[in-house]
């Protein structure tokens, strides 16, 4: 098949973003038939090739035009851009936040350390896999510390006497806790993003637009709810005013019930129990709130 007519995406093969990246493609209606060790896969029902690679290589592949787009954490892209002399990396554009893989890049010290502030780290050793981001962060704050580069299992460094502090990703915080460490500074808030380079032809641009439309549809659906209720006609305006973020609900007649109407609406904001209680107090009944799977505006 002609590669000019296909879009090439790089995602993480194994690791914290791998499963969610695949699930996201599935939710976009893209079928990937892939065996466990397969590194390249052609989507069955969308002109998309997916490369399964190490997350640290994704910026390089996208910058080198081997792939057009990629899914990775903001932390990985930023660290690569700061560390590398490859100016092509600067041409990578982050085009969408994807909302999963949320974490913090944080500095942590042993629980026994009576931490007073960044000046405590002056002249100390900090173990990290994120040399670029950390050195920029410390430099901007006038802290001079030695960065001990590690590829993983950074939390072990203080216990081994290799460093007085660490700088690593924190999600639930349980890895820090089991290693007797406490989070003292947040260096960066991060989540997954979609990135692209500037080499797409018009067909590939169109495919990326289609993919982003689906991604936007999923994100819109995530925050919205479909609400259905019955309401007395004379209470309609009060009920409409309570419905969160819905300006034009659908009003339907109810057979055999002349004083009541059914109100259906997509609500932009969360529908909480107190919203439902408000609706009920204003005369609504049979209030049903449903999740929305996908939306195209
Ligand atoms: C990351 C990070 C921490 C852990 C934090 O490791 O390096 O070790 O997750 O998560 P928590 O706050 O939920 O405990 P990851 O599993 O991504 O593997 P890595 O060691 O290869 O970085």
Image (cartoon, rainbow, N blue to C red):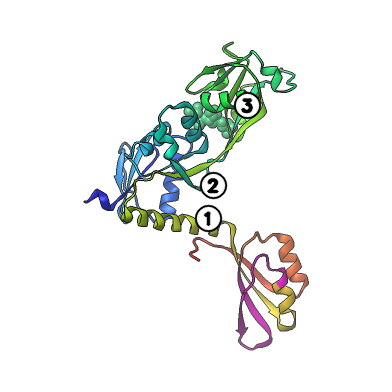
| Rendered residue at 31%/51% (across/down) | 201
Residue 296: percent from left, percent from top: 48, 64
Among numbered discs 3 and 1, the one appearing first in the sequence: 3
Among numbered discs 3 and 2, the one appearing first in the sequence: 2
User: Is 117 above or below relative to 276?
Assistant: above
The residue lying toward the viewer, choosing from 273 and 207, is 207
| Rendered residue at 35%/52% (across/down) | 31
Residue identifier under label 1? 219
Residue placed furthest toward the left: 1
The magenta segment: 241-266
- Dot 3: what SS? helix
With 130 as the anchor, is 203 left or right in this view? left
User: Is 147 above or below relative to 175?
Assistant: above
Question: Which numbered disc covers residue 140?
Answer: 3
Are dots 2 and 1 in contact, CB under 8 Å? yes
Residue 165: percent from left, percent from top: 62, 19
| Rendered residue at 66%/16% (across/down) | 122
Residue 295: percent from left, percent from top: 50, 63
- Dot 1: what SS? helix
Q: Would residue 155 be counted in the magenta stretch? A: no
User: Is 234 above or below relative to 38?
Assistant: below
With 247 as the anchor, is 148 left or right in this view? left
Q: Residues within 10 Å of mark 3 (few under 14, many from 20)?
A: few
Q: How many marks?
A: 3
The residue lying toward the viewer, choosing from 206 and 37, is 206
């Amino acid at each position: 098949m002609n590669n000019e007519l296909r879009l090439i995406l790089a995602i993480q093969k194994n690791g914290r973003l791998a499963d969610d990246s695949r699930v996201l493609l599935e939710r976009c209606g893209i079928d990937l038939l892939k065996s466990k060790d397969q590194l390249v896969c052609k989507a069955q029902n969308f002109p998309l090739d997916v490369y399964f690679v190490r997350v640290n290589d994704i910026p390089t592949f996208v910058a080198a035009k081997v792939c057009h787009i990629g899914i990775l954490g903001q932390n990985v892209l930023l660290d690569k851009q700061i560390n590398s002399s490859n100016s092509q990396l600067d041409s990578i554009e982050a085009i969408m936040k994807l909302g999963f893989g949320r974490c913090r890049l944080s500095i942590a010290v042993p629980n026994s350390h009576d931490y007073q502030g960044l000046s405590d780290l002056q002249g100390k050793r900090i173990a990290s896999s994120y040399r670029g981001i950390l050195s920029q962060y410390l430099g901007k704050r006038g802290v001079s510390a030695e960065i001990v580069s590690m590829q993983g299992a950074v939390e072990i460094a203080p216990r081994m006497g290799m460093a007085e502090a660490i700088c690593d990703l924190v999600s639930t915080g349980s890895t820090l806790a089991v290693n007797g460490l406490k989070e003292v500074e947040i260096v960066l808030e991060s989540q997954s993003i979609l990135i692209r380079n500037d080499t797409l032809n018009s067909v590939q641009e169109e495919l990326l637009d289609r993919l982003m439309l689906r991604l936007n549809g999923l994100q819109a659906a995530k925050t919205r709810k479909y609400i259905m209720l019955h309401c007395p006609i004379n209470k309609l305006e009060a009920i409409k005013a309570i419905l969160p973020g819905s300006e034009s609900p659908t009003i339907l007649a109810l057979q055999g019930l002349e004083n009541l109407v059914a109100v259906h609406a997509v609500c932009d904001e969360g529908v909480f129990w107190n919203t439902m209680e408000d609706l009920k107090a204003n005369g609504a009944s049979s209030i049903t709130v449903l999740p929305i799977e996908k939306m195209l505006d």
